[in-house]
Image (cartoon, rainbow, N blue to C red):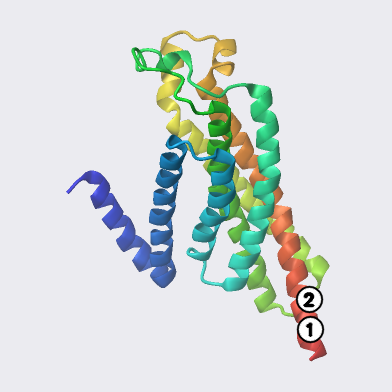
Amino acid sequence: MSTLTALLIVLAILMTIVGGETGIRSFFSVLINTLLLILVAILISWGISIPLLILIFVPLKLVTIIFLGTHDYQVAKNSFYSSLVVCLAASLIILGFEWLAQAAGLGPEAGEILVGLSQMPGLSYPLIAVAVAIFSTLGAVAEAAVSMSSGLLEIKKHNPAISYEDLKASGAKIGNDVLGTAMNTILFGMFGSFLSLFLWYIRLNYTLGEVLNEKMFVNEALIIMYSLIGVLLTVPLATTFLAKNMVKVGEKNESK
């Protein structure tokens, strides 16, 4: 048994114990999303249109992330719509900044590995960079949307008579906590994944200017910024969507 298999078994057991049925569905959500990412990579290597793959797989991944990992349909529906709108807005931001950065492709650090190999495989590196950035933001956006929707739904359940303004105010308070934890998670994730690269920069005496203009660092930093922007957009949007929907449902129930 490999280490990865053992860790997957431990993860499945712990998610089942802690989350019950929802934990099991969340575990399968992780597996399905991993397979979807592998499928996207394979299809891109076959020359399938990258924009078409983004249009197909972004909603598909959001569905598997949110609906399989959430036990409440109302929370899942609101989170999905909020995440989808944020992803559309983030995609426009990503397209603009990827064009400005011109950081797509392979850096000089990959030269030794690719000696004797063609660096022109017939694929669009800028479009691949856009696809990577969009898929990288999905997890943070979906997590923030579910956190906001779940918190607001619990408030509404415990106080059915709460007004739209009070619900939005509560959402703002929840959003502050969600933003803090999400940003720390994203930043520490970047630091952990790039620690060896940072050490390499230091040992090779890279200047600050060289680091800031190095493709690998720029691409990772851009993805971090896209994720942070996505979370920032998700918090007010998810709050507004769910608050309006809950108030409308409450008014309909009162009229009946």
Q: Residue at x 76, y 80 (%)?
A: 250
> In what element is the residue under mark 1?
helix
Residue 80 in the image, given as x and y percentages of width and height: 61, 60
Label 2 sits on what residue type? Lys
| Residue in the foreground of this view, choosing between 188 and 22 | 22
> In what element is the residue under mark 2?
helix
Quarter holding residue 129:
top right
| Residue in the foreground of this view, choosing between 244 and 177 | 244
Q: Is residue 235 left or right of residue 32?
A: right
> In the displayed structure, would residue 256 be above or below residue 165?
below
Q: CA distance from mark 1 to mark 2?
A: 6 Å
Q: Residue at x 68, y 29 (%)?
A: 97
Q: Residue at x 48, y 63 (%)?
A: 69
Label of residue 248 in the image: 2
Residue 132 in the image, given as x and y percentages of width and height: 53, 37
Residue 233 in the image, given as x and y percentages of width and height: 71, 48
Dot 1 crowding, Cα within 10 Å, few <14, some 14–19, many 20+: few
Disc 1 marks which residue?
A: 252
Q: Is residue 129 left or right of residue 168?
A: left
Residue 76 in the image, given as x and y percentages of width and height: 58, 66
